[in-house]
Image (cartoon, grey):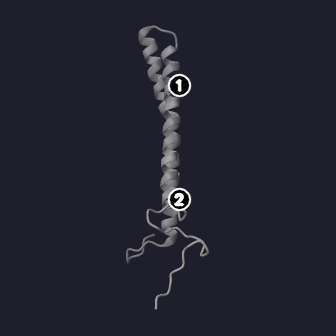
Amino acid sequence: MVPPDGEPSAEFVARQETYKGFGDALAMAFEMVMTPLLFGLGGYALDRWLGTSPVFTLILSVLGIIGMSAKMWYGYEARMQAHDAAAPWAKSSGPAVTRHPSITPQKRDRP
């Protein structure tokens, strides 16, 4: 719970992040199942309307599966790039390169 002073505790923040992760995973699982299913049902309706064999059912189902696979792949890549950019080992834009002292030139003392 949030204390009266308005600052959430570390336990509250951790629990909130856990619940957000569960919610994201449930939404992703629902989307993975429902998208190809709806595409397949649309193909089935199209096949019934046109009087064709299950051509459109198969084509739209496979298209839904391929589309969801691509969405998951590119979403994962984007999340990993954002995670790596925030990590301590990420490349910075400044001259924060650490070199061994024997490689860097020494400053000369001027009299």
Residue at (49, 29) in percent of width and height: 64
Q: Which residue lies furthest to the bottom in this view?
A: 111
Q: What residue type is labelled 1?
A: Val
Q: Is 94 located above or below residue 28 in the figure?
A: below
Report helix, strand or loop for mark 1.
helix
Residue at (46, 28) in percent of width and height: 38
Q: How far across and down, in percent of the image, does residue 46 sit?
A: 43, 16
Question: Quadrant where the N terminus lies?
Answer: bottom left
Q: How far across and down, in percent of the image, does residue 12 sit?
A: 49, 68
Q: Count neighbours of disc 1 (C-alpha within 10 A) and say few if under 14, some if 14 to 19, many if 20 or more.
A: some
Q: Between 52 and 66, which is closer to the camera in this rendering?
A: 66
Q: Alpha-carbon distance for marks 1 and 2?
A: 33 Å
N-terminal of the pair, mark 1 or mark 2, is: 2
Q: Which mark is residue 38?
A: none
Q: Is 50 located above or below residue 24 in the figure?
A: above
Residue at (44, 22) in percent of width and height: 42
Q: Count neighbours of disc 2 (C-alpha within 10 A) and say few if under 14, some if 14 to 19, many if 20 or more.
A: few
Q: Quadrant of residue 50?
A: top left
Q: Residue 18 carries which label?
A: 2
Q: Which amino acid does label 2 sit on?
A: Thr
Q: Which residue lies furthest to the front in this view?
A: 111
Contact, mark 1 vs mark 2 (Cβ under 8 Å)? no
Which residue is label 1 attached to? 62
Q: Between 39 and 91, which is closer to the camera in this rendering?
A: 91
Q: Between 29 and 59, which is closer to the camera in this rendering?
A: 59
Q: How far across and down, in percent of the image, does residue 7 sit?
A: 41, 74
Q: In which quarter of the image is residue 45?
A: top left
Report helix, strand or loop for mark 2.
helix
- For discs 1 and 2, the disc positioned in front in the rendered view: 1
Q: How far across and down, in percent of the image, does residue 48 sit?
A: 45, 12
Residue at (44, 66) in percent of width and height: 94
